[in-house]
Amino acid sequence: MFKKIRLRLTLLSGGITTVILIIMTLGYLFISEKNLIQTRILSVYNDIYTIASNLEQYGMLSYTWLSQLESSGSYHIFILDNGSPFLYNNKDRSSLKYDTFVSNCWEYYHTNSSAMSESTLSYLSSYKKFTYSKNQCFVIDYKKDKSHLEILIIMPHSQIHSSIIVQRFLFLVIISAALLAIWLFSYFFTGRLLRPIEESRIRQNRFTAAASHELCTPLAVILSYAETLDRTDSSTAIIKNEALRMASLIDDMLILSQSDADRFDIEKIPAELDTILLNTSEKFEAMAKEKNIRINVSLPENAIPKCVCDPNRIAQVITILIHNAISYTPENGTIRLNLSVNTFNFIITVSDTGIGIPDEEKEHIFERFYRCEKSRSVKGHFGLGLSIAYEIIQAHCGIINVSDAPDGGSVFTVILPL
Ligand code: ADP
C-alpha cells in the first residue's frame, strides 16, 4: 500500500514540477529565439551604417575589411560596380551556390526594387530591405558622380535556423537532466516523507494483531464457562451472545491486520464456484427462515470452468454478502444469488429486497468500521464485513461493487478473472 502511495505522490509532485518547468522553458525559449533574431538584424543594420559611412568618408571599401565584416556578421556581401560584379577574395560561398543564387537575387531585386520601400542613410546612399527564398536581404545603393555601387547583404536563413536548433537542442539536454533529477528527488523525498507514517502503521498493525491474539484466550475461557451455566437463564444467553460477537470482531480485526501487513494467506487452487455458492447459501437457510426470507440461487445450466481462487476466502466473501443481505432485509423479503461466466470473468451477484444503500454512502461502505445511518439499529455488526470482502477480492485481482436493485434493495457484484 505504501509503495502505491509513494508512487502516486511521486507522480503528483514530479508531474506538477515537470509541467511548470516545461511551461517556463517554452516561454524562455520563445523569448530568447525572438532576441536572437532581433540581435542578428540589429547587427546587420549596424554594419549597413558602417559600410555607408566608410564609403562616404574614404570613397572605397577594403577587401580585408569586407571579409572581416562578412565573417563576423554571419552573412554574405556581394557588390555591383556600375552593374558589373565586383569580386574580392572573400570566404567560401559554395554553400550558397553563389552564381545562380546571387544572380537570381540581383534579378529579383532589380525587377522589384521600385516597389520596395527605401530608407535613406545619407544624401549619397540609401538601402532597401527584402526577403528572397526565406533569406533576409539588404541592398545599399551608393551614388557619387559617375560611380554607382550596389552592395547586397544576404543573411542566410539556414544560419539563424541552425542557431535556433542548437539552442533548442541544448535546452532539451538541460531540461531532460533537470527532469531526471526532479523525478529521482521526488521519489526519494516521498519515500523519506512516508517512512515515519509507514513505521507507525507497522507498529499499529503489530499492536492490533497482538491485542487480538491476547483477547482470544480470555474469550475462549468465558465462552467455555458460559456453556456450563444454566441455559435457560437470560443473562447466560446475553453473556454467550456478546462473547460470540466479540470473538467475531477479533477474527475480523486479525484478518485486516494480516492484510495490512501483506501477510494475507491466499491459497489459490482450481475451485468450483457454483459449489461454493450452493454450500454457503445452505448455511443461511435457518437464519433466513427466521425472517421468512427466501434465498433463490441461480447457476449456469452448462458446466463452467473452474475458478483459480482461494475457495475458503471466496466462501467468506459470499458469507459476508448473504449475512448482510439477510440482516438488512425486512421479513418476507427475497435474496437472489446469481453466478454467470463470460469470456473474461466469473460474475457473482447477491441482490436483496432490503433497505438499500443511499448513493452518498455507497462509496464509503467498503471502509473499515463504516455503517450506514439506516442500518445502525441492526445489532451484531461492526462495519468490518465489506472491508474484509474488499481486501479478499483485491487479493484475487477482482472487483467488488454495489448498485441499487430494480425493486429496491441492493445488488453486490463480485467479478473474478477467468
Ligand atoms: P456491517 O458489519 O455493519 O454489516 P459491512 O462492512 O458488512 O458492515 O457493511 C457496511 C455497511 O454497509 C453496513 O453497516 C450497512 O449500512 C451497509 N450494507 C451492507 N450490506 C447491505 C445491504 N445488503 N443492504 C443495505 N445496507 C447494506
Image: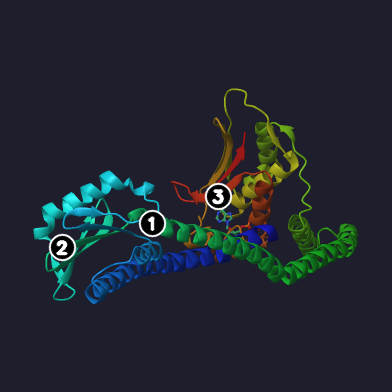
Task: Please state, as top left, top right, bottom left or bottom right, where the N terminus lies in the image.
Answer: bottom right
Decide which of tag 1 and tag 3 comes sooner along the chain: 1
Q: Name the N-terminal-most of marks 2 and 3.
A: 2
Ligand 1 in which quarter = bottom right
Question: Image point 77% across, 68% down: which residue?
Answer: 199
Q: For this view, does 222 lie left or right of residue 84?
A: right
Q: Farthest residue toward the top?
A: 302
Residue 290 visible within the image? no
Q: Within 10 angstroms of label 1, few (less than 14), some, or many (20 or more) residues?
A: few
Q: Quadrant of residue 47?
A: bottom left
Q: Which residue is mark 2?
A: 148
At label 2, which amino acid type do we have?
His
Vertical order, 54 against 398 (above or below) = below
Q: Quadrant of residue 70?
A: bottom left
Q: Residue at x 60, y 50 (%)?
A: 326
The residue depicted at 70 percent of the width and 68 percent of the height is 194
Q: Between marks 2 and 1, how big is the CA–CA gap?
A: 30 Å
Answer left or right for 377 relative to 279. Answer: left
Could you say whether the residue bearing mark 3 is in a helix, strand or loop?
A: strand
Checking the image for residue 159, the label placed there is: 1
Amino acid at dot 1: Gln
Q: Is mark 2 within 8 Å of ligand 1?
A: no
* Residue identified by numbered label 3: 401
Local secondary structure at mark 1? helix
Q: Please state if 306 lies on the left or on the right of 374 as rendered.
A: right
For the point 68% across and 38% down, the residue is 282
Residue 50: give x, y in percent of width and height.
Answer: 29, 73
Inspect the image, locate mark 3, and give the three-letter code of the amino acid beneath it.
Asn
Q: Secondary structure at mark 2?
A: strand
